[in-house]
């Protein structure tokens, strides 16, 4: 059984990009995260310690973005999915990062990756 915890449109203002002007000022990124887990123990215990705490995942994403500067969304996505898989009780994570200021003519652009915990 695979249950899902999700975070939608988590906004983080950070420095990211390959161009010099992108490295001068923070810009918004939006994160959508889907994490597969199992709710069975939490449903039995009714205890927050038995769940994937989406607030803690959100805080971890924000902290990483504020402390790490990379040029590519792809690099950031790999780093964040590795962190989530290693630090939280999830078997798979899908991460979508949107960068709304990257292409003026588009509402947003971005990437999406899915990674599974290694057995």
Image (cartoon, rainbow, N blue to C red):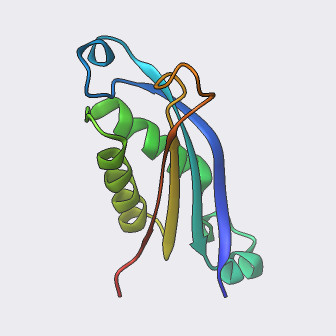
The image quadrant where one finds the N terminus is bottom right
* Location of residue 54 with respect to 82 vertically, above or below: above
* Location of residue 69 with respect to 57 vertically, above or below: above
Front one among 77 and 62: 77
Tell me the residue at 63%/80% (across/down): 38
In this rendering, position of residue 34 left or right of residue 16: right
* Location of residue 81 with respect to 11 vertically, above or below: below
In this rendering, position of residue 44 left or right of residue 103: right
Front one among 17 and 31: 17
User: In which image quadrant can residue 118 be found?
Assistant: bottom left
Tell me the residue at 67%/82% (across/down): 41
> Residue 105's spot in the image, x, y percent?
58, 22
User: In which image quadrant can residue 11 be found?
Assistant: top right
* Location of residue 24 with respect to 12 vertically, above or below: above
Front one among 104 and 79: 104
The image quadrant where one finds the C terminus is bottom left
């Amino acid at each position: 059984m695979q249950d899902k915890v999700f975070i939608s449109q988590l906004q983080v203002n950070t420095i990211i990009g390959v161009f010099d002007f992108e490295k001068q000022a923070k810009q918004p990124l939006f994160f959508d995260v889907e994490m597969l887990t199992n709710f069975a123990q939490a449903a039995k215990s009714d205890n927050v310690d038995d769940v994937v705490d989406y607030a803690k995942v959100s805080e971890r994403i924000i902290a990483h973005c504020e402390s790490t500067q990379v040029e590519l969304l792809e690099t950031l996505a790999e780093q964040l999915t590795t962190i989530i898989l290693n630090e939280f009780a999830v078997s798979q994570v899908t991460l979508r990062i949107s960068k709304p200021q990257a292409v003026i003519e588009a509402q947003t652009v971005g990437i999406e990756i899915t990674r599974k915990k290694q057995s």
